[in-house]
Amino acid sequence: MWELMIPLLAATVQSGTPILFATLGEMMTEKGGVLNLGVEGMLAVSALAAFVTSMYTGSPWLAFFAGGFAGFAMAALHGFVCITCLGNQVVSGLAITILGLGLADFIGVPYVGLPAPGFDPFPFPVLSQIPIIGDIFFKHDALVYVSFVVPVIFWFFLKRTSLGMHVSATGEMPAAAAAVGLKPIKLRYLAVVVGGFLIGLGGAYLSLAYTHLWTNGLSGGRGWIAVALVIFAFWRPGRAVVGAYLFGGVMAFQLRLQAMGTNLPSSLLLMLPYLLTIIVLIISAARGRRIDAPAALGTNIEPEG
């Protein structure tokens, strides 16, 4: 049994890694009070930016951060529309998705099918020798190991630093935050661009570690999964990890079923995590549990005088 389960669980961790980066990025953005529905387009642009950087420089690490900064730039555009120009956050996010997907597909045409230097798996010293746990979690590429640390840093930033608590306050009550001397506009920009950078790292993972090549449609709906996962996780980074691996497990499982030649539609399996999200929300509402969305999420605030 373990001979079958361990490879599947290891594939779950790998498949869930880009989703985890994107989910934490969206969560950071929403903690500041800004809704970002442009995650899908940002993933696509970041994946292409990372791939092209790696191809021409030969440096996967430089390419990884190039993907992050591509997400940063797309998020800054979204922030300018929503925060500075007071544009509709839903419309802006959808426009970012359409722009990002179209831009990546157009610019990426010459690179379709080409390989580029990326990240290869290697056993993590000592920890990879732990029975079962080592095979599942510690025989991956370096970016998976980075993803183990990021949620902890994210949690510490929000819960144990004054800047993180200021960002959360801006997402909850921007008027009250301004009344005590904070700068809600600047804090919202910080949440948006840092969130965009994390989303960009997720996109970079897709082309540098998950595939090692470029193909159109590489984001594969993961941006929308990330948006759903923020709700599924109740805006908590620990639950985001569980949710990302849940979605990653479904994706890994359906790929294995396809390889085995089963007739079960893959779209049916991909639907299950979304259905689970709806069920969790219904159960939470039935029990009277508070959905911990930031109170000012999606609400624009007037520029600071």
Image: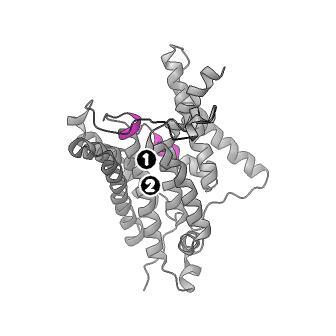
Q: Which quarter shows the C terminus?
A: bottom left
Q: Looking at the image, is 42 positioned above or below residue 185?
A: above
- Name the residue: 52% across, 63% down: 298
User: Within the image, what quadrant is residue 58 found in?
Assistant: top left
- Name the residue: 46% across, 77% down: 302
User: Within the image, what quadrant is residue 196 found in?
Assistant: bottom left
Q: Amino acid at mark 1?
A: Gly
At label 2, counting other C-alpha atoms closer than 10 Å, the crowd grade (few under 14, some 14-19, many 20 or more) is many
Q: Looking at the image, is 31 positioned above or below residue 55?
A: below
Q: Nearer the viewer, residue 266 or 14?
A: 14
Q: Which residue is mark 2?
A: 198
Q: Amino acid at mark 2?
A: Leu
Q: Disc 1, disc 2: CB below 8 Å?
A: yes
- Name the residue: 36% across, 67% down: 80
Return the x and y of residue 56 as percentages of the image width and height.
21, 44
Q: Is residue 88 visible?
A: no
Q: Which quarter shows the N terminus?
A: top right
Q: Which residue is mark 1?
A: 202
Return the x and y of residue 145 as percentages of the image width and height.
50, 45
Q: Looking at the image, is 176 positioned above or below residue 265?
A: below
Q: State how many labels appear.
A: 2
- Name the residue: 60% across, 44% down: 243
Return the x and y of residue 89 as percentages of the image width and height.
45, 61
Q: Nearer the viewer, residue 13 or 88?
A: 13
User: Within the image, what quadrant is residue 250 found in?
Assistant: top right
Callout 1 secondary element: helix
- The magenta segment: 208-226
Question: Is residue 223 highlighted in magenta?
Answer: yes
Q: Is residue 210 left or right of residue 282?
A: left
